Amino acid sequence: MDDVGHSAITAPRTACVFGASGGIGRALVEALSAAGCGLIYAGSRRGEGPVLPGVRPFGFDLGDEASIAAAAELMRTQPPEWVIVATGVLTLADGTGPERSYKRLDAGTMAEVFALNTIGPALIAKHVLPLMPRGAGFTFAALSARVGSISDNRLGGWHSYRASKAALNMLLRNFALEMARTHPDSVIVGLHPGTVDSALSAPFQTGLPEGQLTCPGDAAANLLGVLARLGPAQSGRIFDFRGEEIPA
């Protein structure tokens, strides 16, 4: 795919962003509203969202499947055409960051990273995908990461984060294959936003090359531009913010 820019954004009529309180998630909600999306479900742990036209906040907890199921039920009568899971963790709440060596592996840390980066998004798919009507196109996207690519891994390290994103990529592929049997116009993809100036990347911004750090607003515009250009032929794959495919 060619590079995409702000002008490429085509807003769906309805959308949902899980993780609307984060840097990228909030920017996605704001960009969707500015682009004219009529109804935007904005999910966060506290149930808060930007006060903007069309925005309908709701609460959910990635670690609580019942809250995800309840959130999906809120959307049953008017399912979103686009669903974006903008959640994820790189550094845990206690300050534990990515492991640079296998000697630093810890079972509890790994379990928490997988719960947030892999299991949570999978449970969102479990409860949201059944809402999608047959015979109509829809898009389900989850934020992934280039470091989740197995074939592109040349540095190693960051074990739990890499593995959790690789597992997420596999699940997205599985969901795409399954949904294609009943919803041939569906698009299910992973998105790599690049290095975005957010709380997730803050501990790792030192020493970045000039121009590599992207503000949340630009990242959101890039990602929405990519989504607007994807079709069923690209379902099950992972794309970066330029629209270029990332190898598995």
Image: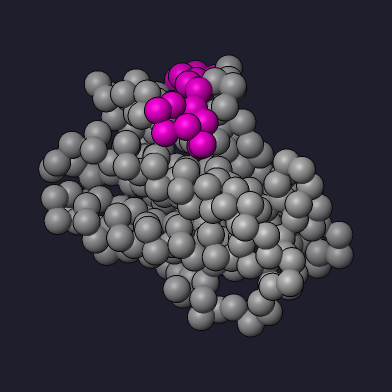
- Residue 64 is covered by the magenta coloring: yes
Q: Which residue is at the front of the view, 26 or 169?
A: 169
Q: Is 204 placed left or right of 222 in the picture?
A: right
Q: Give the color scheme: rainbow, by chain, secondary structure or one colour.
A: one colour
- Residue 31 is covered by the magenta coloring: no
From the image, which quarter does the N terminus lie in? Answer: bottom left
The residue shown at (48%, 21%) is 58
The residue shown at (69%, 73%) is 102
- Image position, residue 87 (x, y; %): 55, 43
Q: Which residue is at the front of the view, 144 or 195?
A: 144
The residue shown at (77%, 43%) is 94
Q: Is 226 placed left or right of 185 in the picture?
A: right
Q: Is 209 placed left or right of 2 in the picture?
A: right
The residue shown at (74%, 66%) is 104
- Image position, residue 70 (x, y; %): 37, 23
Q: Which residue is at the front of the view, 170 or 213?
A: 170
* Count of number-bearing discs: 0
Is residue 131 visible to us here?
A: yes
- Image position, residue 72 (x, y; %): 34, 28
From the image, which quarter does the C terminus lie in? Answer: bottom left
Which residues fall within the magenta stretch? 52-67
Is residue 143 visible to us here?
A: no
- Image position, residue 190 (x, y; %): 45, 57
Q: Which residue is at the front of the view, 104 or 187?
A: 104
